[in-house]
Amino acid sequence: MATADDPPATVTPKSTAPVAETPKPTPKPTPAPAKPAATPAGKAGAASAGVTPPINKMRRRLIWSGVWGFIAANFFMFLRFFFPRVLFEPNTVHNIGYASDFDIGVNEKFKQAYRIWVVKEPPRLFCIFARCTHLGCTPDWKPAENKFKCPCHGSGYTPEGINFEGPAPRPMDRAHIEKDAQGQIIVDTSRLYSWFKSQGGPDNFEDPGAFITI
Ligand code: FES
């Protein structure tokens, strides 16, 4: 057992031989990133940067607009084939009532609607188509003068529509007229009867259909 009088124990130092340290590898200096070379202006520059220049975008848009426009036009033309080409014309066949609805003489009731005058002259009733035979104006009925007068160049017609003054070359035409099963009068303004009086042509005013007997 060690006492205070015992000499201090000698501490044998551990081996102090220097240990050779493994040299750490020195990191190689990383070369600084090379600065990009100055890009040339224009297409090449934009392309190399991955950006589409605005002029190319515009060109592309124009081309696509043209392509789609062409396709759309062709599509509509294709659709057009499915719709019939129908010409809508106004109806020319009219029911104007009974003969007893009209007084003797010229009646203007249907002039605006159907462009006809109904003329009752027993034993006949007929319809004058209200178109001047000179250049096609619509004459006026002048009851005070008992005649039709064209406002364009002054042609005059009798109450039967026979021309007697002015440049009109012939009487006004008459519309086809007939009675239906109920005795009502049906007028068709697409079927006209003419009298080529001064030209020596036929007189169709006597044809069946040019008048009805009342
Ligand atoms: S159009 Fe009627 S007179 Fe000329």
Image (spheres, rainbow, N blue to C red):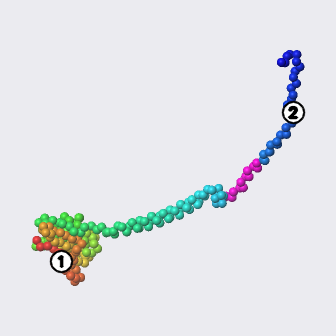
Q: Which label lies toward us, 2 or 1? A: 2
Work out whether residue 199 or residue 72 is closer to the camera in this orientation and state it: 72
Q: Residue 189 placed where, x, y %? A: 23, 71
Residue drawn at point x = 47 percent, y = 64 percent: 69
Amino acid at dot 1: Phe
Residue drawn at point x = 87 percent, y = 33 percent: 16
Q: How busy is the neighbourhood of tag 2: few (under 14 within 10 Å), some, or many (20 plus)?
A: few
Instruction: Say what secondary structure mark 2 lies in.
Output: loop
Specify the quadrant of the image occupied by residue 162.
Answer: bottom left
Drawn side of residue 45 relative to residue 66, left or right:
right
Asked if the stretch drawn in magenta spans residue 28, the answer is no
Mark on residue 88?
none
Q: Is the residue 2 above or below the residue 169 in the image?
A: above
In the rendered structure, are the residues bearing label 2 and label 1 in contact, judged by CB atoms less than 8 Å apart? Answer: no
Q: Name the quadrant of the N terminus.
A: top right
Q: Name the quadrant of the C terminus.
A: bottom left
Say which residue label 1 marks.
205
Q: Residue 117 placed where, x, y %? A: 19, 68
Residue sticking out furthest to the bottom = 200
Asked if the stretch drawn in magenta spans residue 38, the answer is yes
Real-space Cα separation, disc 2 to disc 1, in angstroms: 152 Å
Q: Which residues are magenta?
A: 30-42
Work out whether residue 115 or residue 65 is closer to the camera in this orientation and state it: 65
Q: Residue 137 placed where, x, y %? A: 27, 70
Mark on residue 16?
2
Q: How busy is the neighbourhood of tag 1: few (under 14 within 10 Å), some, or many (20 plus)?
A: some
Instruction: Say what secondary structure mark 1 lies in.
Output: helix
